[in-house]
Image (cartoon, rainbow, N blue to C red):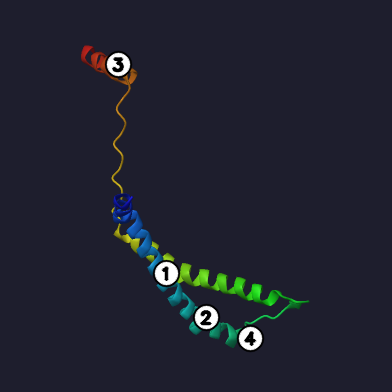
Amino acid sequence: MIKEFKEFILKGNAIDLAVGVLIGAAFGGFVSAVTEGIIKPVISAVGGNPEVSLKLGILDIGIVINAAVSLLITGAVLFFVFVQPMNKLKALGQKPAAPAAPPEPSAQEKLLAEIRDLLKKSS
């Protein structure tokens, strides 16, 4: 069992997953900081307090609305500031695909070409 565990851990997938989770957590903190430090103050300056409070009895629906708005803002920041520029950089770094070679002629096309060539020779 220890040998199997060692093989599992040493596989690239487990290491990549662990690194991805740690980088994701750090990146999440960075995006939260950008949202809290830059985006929310701009929204507050333009439209007032972004915090919503909506209580229905003992339920506070405002917290859910705040979380949804925060998720949308965070997603927009991720997409426009990080994902879109990275996709453009990847596209610049990729070599254009070589044009596909034309398909080999079928047996019928080869036969017709031979007949054409014979007719040209006899004329």
Instruction: Tell me if label 2 and label 1 are in contact, CB under 8 Å.
Output: no
Distance CA(mark 2)–CA(mark 3): 70 Å
Mark 2 or 3: the one toward you: 2
The residue under the point 60% across, 73% down is: 67
Identify residue type, mark 3.
Leu
Category of crowding for the residue at label 1, using alpha-carbon neighbours closer than 10 angstroms: few (below 14), some (14–19), many (at least 20): few
Would you name the residue on which mark 3 appears?
111
The residue under the point 56% across, 70% down is: 71
* Residue 47 pos. (x, y %): 63, 84
Near-viewer residue (68 or 44)? 68
Name, please, the residue furthest toward the right. 57
Distance CA(mark 4)–CA(mark 3): 79 Å
Q: Identify the disc placed on residue 49.
A: 4
Vertical side of 21 occupied by 112: above or below: above
Category of crowding for the residue at label 2, using alpha-carbon neighbours closer than 10 angstroms: few (below 14), some (14–19), many (at least 20): some
Would you name the residue on which mark 1 appears?
82
Vertical side of 16 occupied by 49: above or below: below
